[in-house]
Each structure stands twice: as C-alpha cells, then as structure tokens.
Image (cartoon, grey):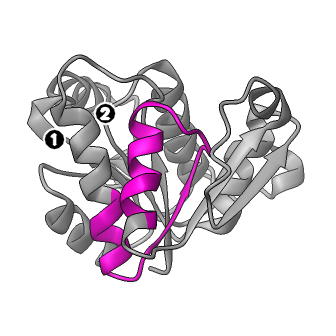
Amino acid sequence: MNRLAIYCGSATPPDPRYVELAREVGSDLARRGIGVVYGGGRLGLMGALAQGALAEGGEVIGVIPHAMVEREFANHDCTQLITVDTMHERKARFTDLADGFVTLPGGIGTMDELFEALSWAQIGYHEMPVGLLNAFGFYDGLIQFVNQMGDTGFIRATHREILQVADSLPELLDKLASYVPNTPIYRMSVDQL
C-alpha cells in the first residue's frame, strides 16, 4: 500500500486521546512510507493527522471542496491540496488516489465516507480494503450493528469481510495488507455511480 485514504472527524473532542490518536496514525503511516489522502482540513482530527504525517516527512494529499477552502478550513501545508466542486467528487478522488481506506473516530461525515467505501466495494467500483480502527472501543456499537446487518441477511456472506476491524493501527495494517477482494454484486464504473 503506497497511500491510504484516512477518514476522520474535523471536530476536536474534549477527550485529548482522539486528537493524539490521529497525530500518531499520521506519524506512523509516514514512518512506514505510506502516504495519507484525507479531507484536506486543518481542524480537529483531520488537522492532527496531517500534522503527524508532515512532521515525519510523509506525503499528505488533501482533497477539499471549494466551499470549504473559501471558509479557510483548508490545510495549505499539505504536500498537495486538491480542490473539487462537490463532496461526491471528493470521495471519488479519495478512491482514485488511495490503495485502501482507514476510518478513525469521527461523526456523520466520517460515517458517510466509511459506508460509501463499503458500498462501492459491494458494487465493484473498487476492490480495496476498508479498515475501521476501533480505538478506545469507539466503534463497538457500530461493529455490533454491522454484524446484526450480516446476521439478518442484509449484508451478503461474501461481503462480511469487506470491513476489516482492529483495535490498533499495526494490526489493522496487517489485515489490510492480506485482504482478499470480495466478489461484487456487479461491476460498476465511475460514470454509473
């Protein structure tokens, strides 16, 4: 894996562990020679992720909609900052630029990105691994819900392994590296999304 798209919150929670986690993930990826593709923001976990990677000399590609740049949320310290017109285009660029996905703690936007990456794997738009870093048990409830969707038949058996989950980044990276792509429902191209 040369680059990973990292999904995480732009908020700064009161608990400092989350910001420190994002900074450590950025640093660790840079030390491993893995580039970061992320939302291009300078605030919250996103900003900490970029700071961590840049401090270690890592590649950081930010992808941000014009509207957010204009409101001064953009991180101009990125190795490369790509501006796009829409949120949909942003997520498509993440997919084009990365070799896999890792989701850190975040909110609604982070969940949107995670579930779109999972959905796109199901329909064959990409064959990349999708990882969930369950630091501090943050995603315990979500993991239970995803398992419930599978147990009741809303997720096909062949797709239950698309989401790779681990409590630590090294474990998650090992899982992503050994991921075997699923059999998609059908294959869709970018113009069909």
Relative side of 12 to 191, left or right: left
Q: Quadrant of residue 57?
A: bottom left
Disc 2 crowd rating (10 Å Cα; few below 14, some 14-19, many 20+) is: many
Question: Upstream in the sequence, badge 2 or badge 1?
Answer: 2
Task: Identify the image quadrant of the C terminus.
Answer: top right
Assign a secondary structure to mark 2: loop
Query: What's drawn in magenta, residue-wise?
Result: 26-54
Q: Position of residue 58 (x, y in %)?
A: 46, 74
Query: At 85% across and 47% down in the image, what residue appears?
Result: 192
Q: Is residue 153 above or below residue 33?
A: above
Task: Identify the image quadrant of the N terminus.
Answer: bottom left
Q: Is residue 130 above or below residue 181?
A: above
Which residue bears the numbered disc 1? 135
Whether pointer 2 and pointer 1 mark residues with C-beta atoms closer than 8 Å, the reply is yes
Which residue bears the numbered disc 2? 105
Relative side of 83 to 32, left or right: right
